Image (tube, helix red, strand yellow):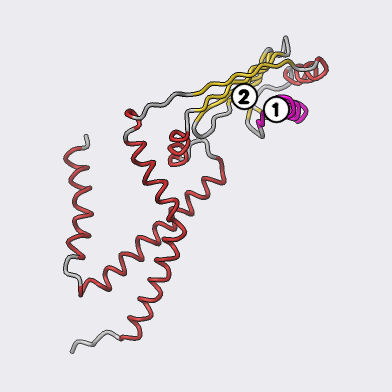
């Protein structure tokens, strides 16, 4: 004897799934729009022209600070952040924030790579002369958004955001799938459409991707 589904139980699950579905969709809406748009720009990156803008700055360390840094360089044998005094001077004089980025130390030079989304930059300090050279490259906002999509040089906070965004997308997708299942009885095209969404990418991957 077949038991009929409990209407109260079905109503509870519909209400619960709808709640999680709209909450997760609200949380990941902007992220999904950005990631979808940058998926297109990344797929056609070779066709999108960009004109990188390069800016250079030159300066010279005060003799006292130069002597202090030069003395430190003789004892440093591995990558380590710039000393606080040098970081403070760079921030005040050149508006350069190296934070805790690791620097490459040698007997005659300090080099700091400062990659960032949508561009790149680097800083070098000549220990013999105290000369500082800083160069920053800006590749534009499309490159910036593309790097956000890839999580390239975006830091810990954005990395956490991507993880949480992915979790919200999973919740959105799975609650949508269960809602499809609950409504499939009245919508004959439900499972053929779901199957089509699985089969088409599989065929493309097996036949056209080598």
Most extreme residue toward the top is 129
- Residue for point 62% across, 22% down: 123
Crowding at label 2, few (<14), some or many (≥20) Cα neighbours within 10 Å? Answer: many
Q: Position of residue 144 (x, y in %)?
A: 48, 36
**Picture quarter with the C terminus:** top left
Q: Nearer the viewer, residue 65 or 92?
A: 92
Measure how far apart labels 2 and 1 are at the Cα level. 9 Å
Residue 63 higher or lower than 121, as above or below: above
Q: Position of residue 104 (x, y in %)?
A: 63, 22
Residues at marks 2 and 1 touching, judged by CB atoms closer than 8 Å: yes
Q: Which residue is mark 1?
A: 82
Tell me which label, 2 or 1, sits earlier in the chain: 1
Query: In the displayed structure, does residue 142 sit left or right of residue 135?
Result: left
Secondary structure of residue under mark 2: strand
Most extreme residue toward the bottom is 1
**Picture quarter with the N terminus:** bottom left
State the mark number for residue 185: none
Q: Nearer the viewer, residue 209 or 51?
A: 51
The residue range painted magenta reads 83-98
Q: Which residue is mark 2?
A: 112
- Residue for point 44% across, 50% down: 31
Residue 48 counted in the magenta span? no
Q: Main secondary structure of the magenta part?
A: helix
Crowding at label 1, few (<14), some or many (≥20) Cα neighbours within 10 Å? Answer: many
Secondary structure of residue under mark 1: loop
Q: How many marks?
A: 2
- Residue for point 65% across, 30% down: 98
Q: Position of residue 152 (x, y in %)?
A: 48, 36
């Amino acid at each position: 004897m077949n038991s009929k589904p409990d209407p109260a139980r079905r109503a509870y699950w519909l209400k619960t799934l709808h709640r999680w579905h709209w909450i997760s969709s609200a949380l990941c809406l902007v992220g999904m729009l950005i990631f979808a748009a940058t998926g297109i720009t990344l797929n056609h990156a070779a066709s999108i022209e960009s004109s990188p803008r390069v800016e250079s700055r030159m300066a010279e360390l005060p003799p006292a600070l130069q002597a202090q840094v030069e003395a430190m360089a003789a004892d440093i044998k591995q990558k380590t952040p710039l000393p606080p005094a040098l970081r403070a001077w760079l921030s005040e004089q050149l508006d350069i924030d190296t934070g805790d980025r690791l620097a490459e130390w040698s007997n005659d030079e300090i080099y700091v790579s400062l990659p960032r989304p949508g561009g790149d930059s680097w800083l070098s300090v000549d220990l013999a002369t105290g000369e500082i050279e800083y160069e920053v490259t800006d590749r534009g906002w499309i490159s910036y958004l593309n790097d956000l999509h890839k999580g390239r040089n975006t830091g810990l906070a954005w990395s956490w955001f991507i993880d949480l965004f992915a979790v919200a997308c999973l919740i959105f997708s799975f609650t949508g799938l269960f809602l499809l299942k609950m409504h499939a009885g009245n919508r004959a095209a439900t499972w053929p459409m779901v199957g089509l969404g699985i089969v088409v990418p599989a065929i493309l991957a097996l036949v056209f991707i080598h």
